[in-house]
Image (cartoon, rainbow, N blue to C red):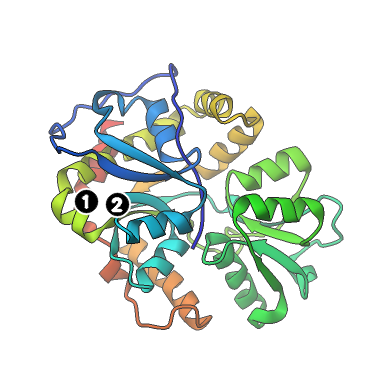
Amino acid sequence: MLQRRTFLTAGGAGLLTLAAPRLLRAETPLRVGDQRGNARAVMQAAGVLKDIEGRIAWSEFPAAAPLVEALNADAIDTGLVGDAPFTFGAAAGVPIKAIAATREGGEGLAILVPKDSPARSFADLKGKRIATGRGSIGHQLVLAALEHAGWPQDAVQLVFLLPSDAKAAYSSGAVEAWSTWEPYVSQEEVLAGSRAVVDSGALKMARMSFQAAREDAIKARRPELADFVRRLAAARAWANDNIPSYANTWSGLMNVPEPVAQRWFERARTRVVPIDDSVVRDEQWNIDLYTRAKLVRRPVKAADILDRSFNDAVQAGLKAS
């Protein structure tokens, strides 16, 4: 289970204000896990955190696996992770449920090869080494590509690495391909000329992430969690309406060239969505994929790990935007 992203401060660019239905009055801050350039970045850029500074304690993680581990250890209350690491965590018994989902375009999850690679399709990677994170959405993509091709799991050599190590292995030629996500896909395409031999859109995979929360936090901190997902939904909607200014702010604060951010945001159009029947269906597809691959060994039902009771908060955020 892996994945990545985190915070920034951002000024200007059409700050969004929200009329909070209720002020947070918890004695201790809500503990929120994030990955670099993700939730905190967009929420600060949109201006939705201005009136609750100090009421959120942010923790940054290099990928989703340690974030899910932190949820399991009660080090954080909530955090955004991809559908793959969320599924692995829930199936392994981590006491979490998803309280909101995000959806985005499929091109940002891809198996990349260097620009001078002879590989032109996934079929050309048979027997080759592919770097990705164990249990990550990159791992999920490889499994889906193998199943689509009718190949066994050992038809390619998976090399499990965290993103920074995977990038190093890929750049040095220690692996022939890298199955990864944004912003790495856009970064490699824009800056290094890498090519995608297959992406999740081509395989008709649902591109989802989940705002996961500990079950005890859902009981004890429901108002704060509802307020958080409301603000996150509004911030994502704002970002989609202000891509050029958000890309400019994000690239400056993350020290990443602006064309990378622009490419990512334009094609991702990441949006927070309520947990509805389509989300349950798509998450069950993920569970079934891992079950067929014998990576999930106990029965898991998507409906049991997805919490619809925060849908009104998500809808309120979308209306506020």
Mark 1 or 2, nearer chain start: 2
Q: Residue furthest top?
A: 12
**195 left or right, relative to 92:** right
C-alpha span from label 1 to label 2: 8 Å
Name which quarter of the figure residue 160 lies in: bottom right
Residue located at (41% from left, 39% from top): 39
The C terminus, quarter of image: top left
Tell me what residue is drawn at x 53 percent, y 61 percent.
137
Helix or strand or loop: what does disc 2 sit on? loop
Q: Residues within 10 Å of mark 1 (few under 14, many from 20)?
A: many
Residue 40, image quadrant: top left
Name the residue: 35% across, 68% down. Answer: 90
Q: Which residue is mark 1?
A: 310
Q: Position of residue 262 (x, y in %)?
A: 59, 33
- For the residue labelled by badge 1, is the local secondary structure a helix, a strand or a loop? helix
Q: What x and y, as percent, mark residue 301?
A: 32, 75
Asked if the residue at tag 2 contacts the one at tag 1, i.e. Cβ–Cβ closer than 8 Å, the answer is yes
Identity, as a three-letter code, of the amino acid under mark 2: Pro
Report the disc number at residue 274: 2
Of discs 1 and 2, which sits in the foreground? 1
Residue nearer the viewer, 68 or 233: 68
**Considering only vertical position in the picture, is 21 above or below 204?**
above
Lateral position of residue 34 relative to residue 227, left or right: right
* Residue 222 x/y as whole percent: 16, 48
- On the question of residue 112 being in view, the answer is yes
Crowd tier of the residue under label 2, counting other residues whose Cα lies within 10 Å: few below 14, some 14–19, many 20 or above? many
Instruction: Report the side of 283 relative to 189 (left or right).
Output: left
Which mark is drawn over residue 265? Answer: none
| Residue type, label 1 | Phe
The one of 270 and 61 positioned closer to us in this rendering: 61
Q: Quadrant of residue 314?
A: top left
- Residue 174 lies, in percent from the top left, at 79, 60
